Image (tube, grey):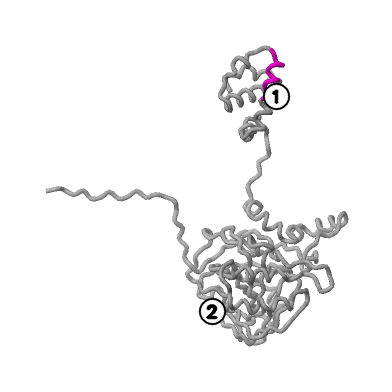
Amino acid sequence: MKKYSHLANHTAMRAEIVFLHAFEKVFRLPLRCLATAGNSKVKMTVMNHLRGILQASPRTLLWRRSQVPRSMPVRSCSLYTCTFRTRNRAYMGESYYKRTRETLLRREELSPRPKVPPLWENLDLVPAGDRQSPINIRWRDSVYDPGLKPLTISYDPATCLHIWNNGYSFLVEFEDSTDKSVIEGGPLEHNYRLKQFHFHWGAIDAWGSEHTVDSKCYPAELHLVHWNAVKFGSFEDAALEENGLAVIGVFLKLGKHHKELQKLVDTLPSIKHKDTLVEFGSFDPSCLMPTCPDYWTYSGSLTTPPLSESVTWIIKKQPVEVDRDQLEQFRTLLVTSEGEKEKRMVDNFRPLQPLMNRTVRSSFRHDYVLNIQVKPKPAASQVTP
């Protein structure tokens, strides 16, 4: 570019510098004679031809790089928006509940309310806490806590009552008036009774889980919801208070057929529509647990309204394998009642929430190997006799 610096004093000739430099860079031909020619019409004719050649050739990228750079605003990269944009757009009400109440009311005056799941229709349920769920678990940033005990699970299959479609997911509910189905240990100080379990899944296999691990999504996620019957008299009271609930999260991934899950899958056609309920007795949900005892734990919230920050989350490290046909049966459920226009129940997960100042603890050690080469120790010199 220095060879054409004598033209830089004239604003009208700056474009020539770019074109001439690009021509030499692409075709490796000297253009000193053209740069010093006095006929500007000849120069512009050559440059117009050059523009057409470059834009129509495989060197278009090089052509664009040769353009005069313009000042553009710099925006800091956001892991949330860059990594999870596609996943969060799949959620039916991604931005609805994240806005403030005032903004929502103002927008409703100008346009109809966005289509969202029925659970999100109440404007008073917009969260404003600093320990919301779900989150992205960063393996490297989790802190090993040797004080975390193994989680003890004791479920009585006879406490299983029914399965029903609530228009957002399907729930399997349990009798919780006694301590027949409880968990203890882990990060918990008391016994917690099993209330229900449900799933979250996506429209495709690329996403579906609510939590992610190192930005990795799973096709689905199982939640087993328990409440603290020692401190509270009912599930409803426990759901609104700190440490009132304990939820075990289990990731589902595509793999071999899950024999125990098939009993549940076979019941789904009978609850295809919203608000349908059938009896579902003698089922032990511990069969849906992975064999590995390792887990992460953190303080969070419900992922559905009222989004109360009352949950101690226990996320299992090892996913459970299910086959594609079983997962496809989840997607046959509908969020609409019988007689209404059918709408599939998919992408029923909440977008990721910021970790804020929380710490994710792990019950297992995790040693990351850094990409650093260590110099080998010099071998001891041997003296030859």
Magenta-colored span: 39-49
54 to the left or right of 109? left
What amino acid is found at the position of numbered circle 2 in the picture?
Thr
Q: Earlier in the sequence, mark 2 or mark 1?
A: 1
Circle 2 Cα neighbour tier, 10 Å, few/some/many (<14 / 14–19 / ≥20): few
Residue at the top extreme of this rendering: 38
Q: How many marks?
A: 2
Q: Pick whichever, 311 or 343, lies toward us.
A: 343
Residue 48 numbered mark, or none: 1
Crowding near pointer 1: few (<14 within 10 Å), some, many (20+)? few
The verdict on residue 167 being magenta is no
The disc at residue 21 is: none
Q: Residue at x 53, y 62 (%)?
A: 142
Residue 212 location in percent, x, y? 60, 62
Q: Determine which of the numbered discs, if any, sits on residue 152 in the image.
A: 2
**Where, by quadrant of the figure, is residue 326 drawn?**
bottom right
Q: Secondary structure at mark 2?
A: strand
Circle 1 — which element? Answer: helix
User: Mark 2 to mark 1: distance in Å?
Assistant: 76 Å
Residue 340 at x, y = what percent? 84, 70
| Picture layout, residue 229 above or below residue 360 | below
Relative image position of residue 259 (x, y in whole percent): 58, 77
Please name whichever residue, 8 or 319, is drawn nearer the observer in this view of the structure: 319
Whether residue 41 is in magenta: the answer is yes
